[in-house]
Amino acid sequence: MTATLEAPTVHTGPQVAEKPRKKNRLGKAFRSSAAILLFLAVWEFAPRFVLDEGTRTFLPPLSEDLVALWELILNGQLADHLLASLGRSAAGFVIAVGVSVPLGLLIAWYRPLAEFLNPLLELARNTAALALLPVFTLLLGIGEVSKIALIVYACVWPVLLNTIAGVNTVDPLLVKAARSLGLSSPNLFRKVILPSAVPAVFTGIRMAAAYSILILIAAEMVGAKAGLGYLINNSQVNFQIQQMYAAIITVSVLGLAINAGFVALERRFSTWRVKEKA
């Protein structure tokens, strides 16, 4: 009587779990984009089958707008306007961040200075940047300087105020513990205050990046000869409706791309906080 030996069973639990994980990721991606997909579907089919001919002239289907966008890409117009807008936006944004972060850290670190400047900061933060567009235009002209200066003004406040808030919300027990270990003020600021304030600072930077695009688009509608704002306004004036929507789509995609870039950068500079949440 012979006994047969059975091959040992190999457990492949982790491999079996791959498919559910992929399905969960696909399901999550679909749920997160379902609202956008529905919006795009309504944009495409409502003008074709719901709206009357007169309204459809001013709200063409998404496919026609995308065709106009592709034509702008092919003839190089979109690249020219996009580079013009990005140059102005980047210049104002970099200046604002370069001024606001050190100033915010200084104000938050020295309480008497914060108490002295707080009323002025509250007044300035509640003054809409676009309300000052005529002032900047009168003082600096309708050229590049006034547009960049307006972007600087709009971007300064979210970065400055979030930097101040980030420093002020550092856990006092953490500061006391660091002082009890003998850390000097410069080391305390560098090793405790700055890392704790990074998330708030990046929140302000992300807000400023969005403002730099939004304010620029409005500023370019006055006295500009190139840029996405000029393209939107000029297309509307010349009744090139599909081209106007193509420029608006470009602004939206640009804003999403910039925000995604700063989210990734924030994760890079606050990896300890991300791991803490995981």
Image (cartoon, rainbow, N blue to C red):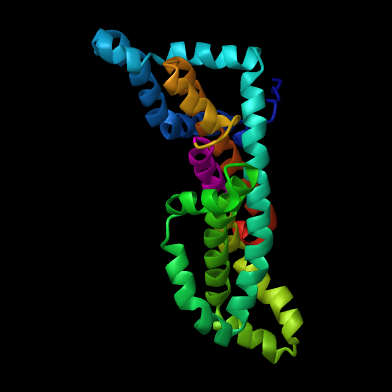
The image quadrant where one finds the N terminus is: top right
Q: Is residue 142 above or below residue 76?
A: below
Q: Is residue 40 above or below residue 13?
A: above
* Residue 72 on image: x %, y %: 59, 16
Q: Residue at x 46, y 34 (%)?
A: 28
Which residue is nearer to you in this view: 161 or 267? 161
* Residue 77 on image: x %, y %: 63, 19
Which residue is nearer to you in this view: 137 or 33? 137
* Residue 209 on image: x %, y %: 58, 48
Q: Is residue 190 above or below residue 201?
A: below
Q: Visible in this render: residue 20?
A: no
Q: Visible in this render: residue 18?
A: yes
Can you tell which quarter of the image residue 122 is in? bottom left
Q: Main secondary structure of the magenta part?
A: helix
Q: Residue at x 54, y 42 (%)?
A: 216
Q: Is residue 253 above or below residue 114?
A: above
Which residue is nearer to you in this view: 201 or 137? 137
Side of 50 relative to 122 (left or right): left
- Per the image, is 210 magenta? yes
* Residue 212 on image: x %, y %: 56, 46
Which residue is nearer to you in this view: 59 or 138? 138
- Per the image, is 85 magenta? no
The image quadrant where one finds the C terminus is: bottom right
Q: Residue at x 50, y 21 (%)?
A: 246
Number of residue marks = 0
Q: Which residues are magenta?
A: 206-221
